[in-house]
Amino acid sequence: MSFFLQMLVTGIVVGSVYSLVALGFVLIYKSSDAINFAQGEFLLVGTYVCLTLVASYHIPFILAVLITLVFSAILGLVVERIVLRPFIGKPVISMIMATIGLSSILAGLVHIIWGHETRVYPKVFSDKPIQLGEVVIAPVYAWSLVIVVVMLVIFTLFFKYSKLGIAMRATADDQQAALSMGISVKTIFAVAWAIAAIVSAVGGVLLGNINGVNSSLSTIGLKVLPVAILGGLDSIPGAIIGGIIIGIIESMTGGYLDPMVGGGLKEVIPFVILVLILMIKPYGLFGKKEIERV
């Protein structure tokens, strides 16, 4: 039972980070109907920037995170303005292909600047484990969960009550109606990309503190895609719930099934779920069905 609870806690923590990164997928899809295949590279760049500030320039971790968030927001704005804005009004597949090219460019830059070696953050969180009954939780896991929950609450309140958040929801529902109400769709697109880069950077920093940092961290971007599709590509609550579900299933698979098959199943199971959900419920658990009449 204690092993089950341990796997459950691990799944919830990692799944919550997936939820945060999946939020970026959902925001960009809601605003532009495109899937951002460079989400994992945004995560990777943000992680390395924060690591460099902490390890090489000895900047305090909190300040380094804040600088990383500003850097990531600017990166998202620059990418949207230079790479993606020219594709507004063009077929959606053009923007999707642009994000694939962007992911390759960012991955190449990361390899050139930081190389391929696995690097670790200097000790940021305490090593003293937290004991909850029979479950032992590492402080980095506990803090990661707290940080993700706080950020998800902040973004939920932002989208529900702030003027900009309401404008983003209006644009996602109907761009033409939003334009008629005086909402700048281009501004909304830029903000969506900035937020997507920010949440990716936060997710990367947390995962980097848990597992270390190397170029393979960008694969989280693809792993989070099943999260977004499971919850519904246009659903923010769906991204949160989908992340927790995928995280728990992945953790349980690694704990119980991987030893039986020699390993590797944990990495595949999110994509098995992706195929199943597309076959059974293509719009996800909370996605909105769209019917086009021709």
Image (cartoon, rainbow, N blue to C red):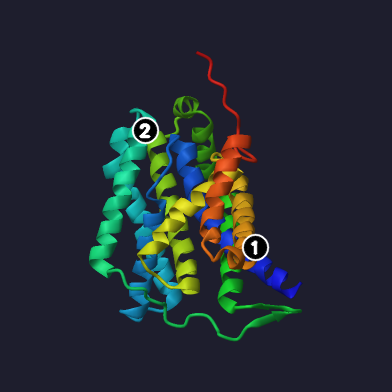
In the picture of the structure, the residue carrying the numbered disc 1 is: 252
Please state the horizontal and vertical placement of residue 288, each as a whole percent of the image: 60, 33
Residue furthest out toward the front:
261
Left of 203 or right of it: where is 160? right
Mark 1 Cα shell of 10 Å, populated few (<14), some (14-19), many (≥20)? many
Please state the horizontal and vertical placement of residue 268, each as a whole percent of the image: 52, 54
Q: Quadrant of the N terminus?
A: bottom right
User: Does the image show residue 161?
Assistant: no
For label 1, the SS is helix
Please state the horizontal and vertical placement of residue 134, each as a whole percent of the image: 74, 79
Left of 139 or right of it: where is 56? left
In space, the residues marked 2 and 1 are separated at their CA atoms by: 36 Å
Residue furthest out toward the left:
112
In-front residue for pair 8/24: 8
For label 2, the SS is helix
Q: Is residue 192 above or below residue 107?
A: above
Contact between marks 2 and 1 (CB within 8 A): the answer is no
Location of residue 54 by image quarter: bottom left
- Residue at the (30%, 48%) spot, across then down: 102
- Residue at the (60%, 29%) spot, across then down: 289
In the picture of the structure, the residue carrying the numbered disc 2 is: 93
Q: Is residue 17 above or below residue 278?
A: below
- Residue at the (31%, 34%) spot, across then down: 87
Q: Is residue 69 above or below residue 102?
A: below
For the residue marked with disc 2, what is the amino acid? Answer: Ile
In-front residue for pair 55/267: 267
For the residue marked with disc 1, what is the amino acid? Answer: Met
Please state the horizontal and vertical placement of residue 250, each as a whole percent of the image: 59, 59
